[in-house]
Image (spheres, rainbow, N blue to C red):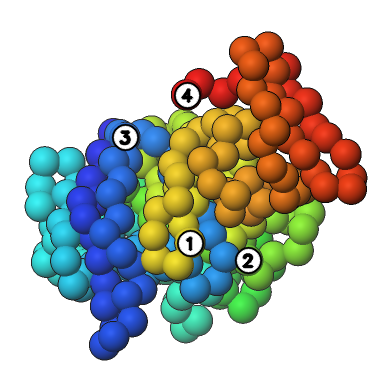
Amino acid sequence: MDGASVSVRGLGKRYGAVRAVKGVEIEVRSGEFLSLLGPSGSGKTTLLMMIAGFEMPSEGAIRIGDRDVTYVAPNRRNIGMVFQRYALFPHMTVADNVAFPLRMRKVVKAEIARRVADALALVQLQDFGKRLPSELSGGQQQRVAVARALVFEPPVLLMDEPLGALDKKLREQMQIEIKRLQQRLGVTVIYVTHDQEEALTMSDRIAVMRDGSLEQIGSPTELYDNPATPFVADFVGKANFLEAVCHSCNGTGLEFGLGQSGFIHLKKCPPT
C-alpha cells in the first residue's frame, strides 16, 4: 500500500456570515502522519470533512496525488475514513462490517474473504469475525473501524478523533497500534485531535489551528521548541507569559524590564 500526497490550497468554508475555515494551505507528504490539532471550534473537523468530501468548500482546491477532488463525491475519492463514533453497522458481524467497502466495489467473494481475513489479522482481531459490534469492547470496535477503512487499501486514511471515547490507558495503547499500522502500511494519515499529547506522540508533523486559520505547521519538536505565536506556545506546551519592556540590546545580551518584578537578561540579542 502506497500513500498519496494531499494538497490543500486556499481552502475555505462559510456558513452564512461565519467563516469556519479561512484560506488554509497544507501540503501533506506521501506516507506522512499529519495531525490537525486545535481547540473545539478551530475548524479542524470541518477541514477534514472537506478533504473527505462530506462538506463542499466555499473556496480553494483539494488534490489527492495528481487528481483534483475538490468537488468529487466522497465514494469516488478512494480514501479510508474512521469516524469519532466508529459508525459500525450494529446488525452486521465484524467480518461483514469489514467486508462492506469491498462489496460496494463489487469485489469477488473469494477476494473479499481473503482481504477481510488479512485486515482482521492486521488489527489482531482474527478470531472475532463472527461477533456483533455490541459484543466488543470500545478498543475492539475502534480496531474494526480501522480494519474496515484499510481493507480496500486506500492511499489516504482520515481519522476524526477516533480515540475520544476511550479511557486513558486504552487510548495510549491504541495510539501505539495506529502508528504501528501506519508505518507498516505506508498509508498517508490525516488525524484530527484536540489532545496535545496524542498529537505529539503520533505525528510526523502537526498543523495547529485556531479560529479557522492555520497558526503553524511543523514537527512536534519544532512546535514545542520554536512556537510561532503565543497561542501555539500555550496550546502545544506549557508557557508563562510576562509583560515586559525592552531596555537594552547591546550585542552581548538583551534586557527586559518587568516593572517592580525586576529584569530578565538574555545572553543573545535576536537578529534585527
Label 4 vs label 2: CA separation?
A: 44 Å
Dot 2 alpha-carbon crowd within 10 angstroms: few under 14, some 14 to 19, many 20 or more: some
Marks 1 and 4, the one that precedes in the sequence: 1
Image quarter of residue 30: top left
Within 10 Å of disc 4 (Cα), the crowding (few <14, some 14-19, many 20+) is few
Residue 29's disc number: 3
Type of the residue with mark 1: Arg
Provide the residue designation for mark 1: 210
Q: Nearer the viewer, mark 3 or mark 4?
A: 4
Are circles 4 and 2 on residues that touch, CB within 8 Å? no
Seen from the viewer's position, the closer of residues 152 and 168 is 168
Sooner in the amino-acid sequence: mark 1 or mark 2: 2
**Residue 225 shows in this picture:** yes
Q: Secondary structure at mark 2?
A: loop
Q: Could you tell me which residue is drawn at 20 percent across and 51 percent down?
A: 9
Lower sequence index among marks 3 and 2 = 3
Residue at the limit of the structure toward the top, as seen here: 252
What residue sits 28% from the left and 49% below the top?
25
Q: Is residue 58 above or below residue 143?
A: below
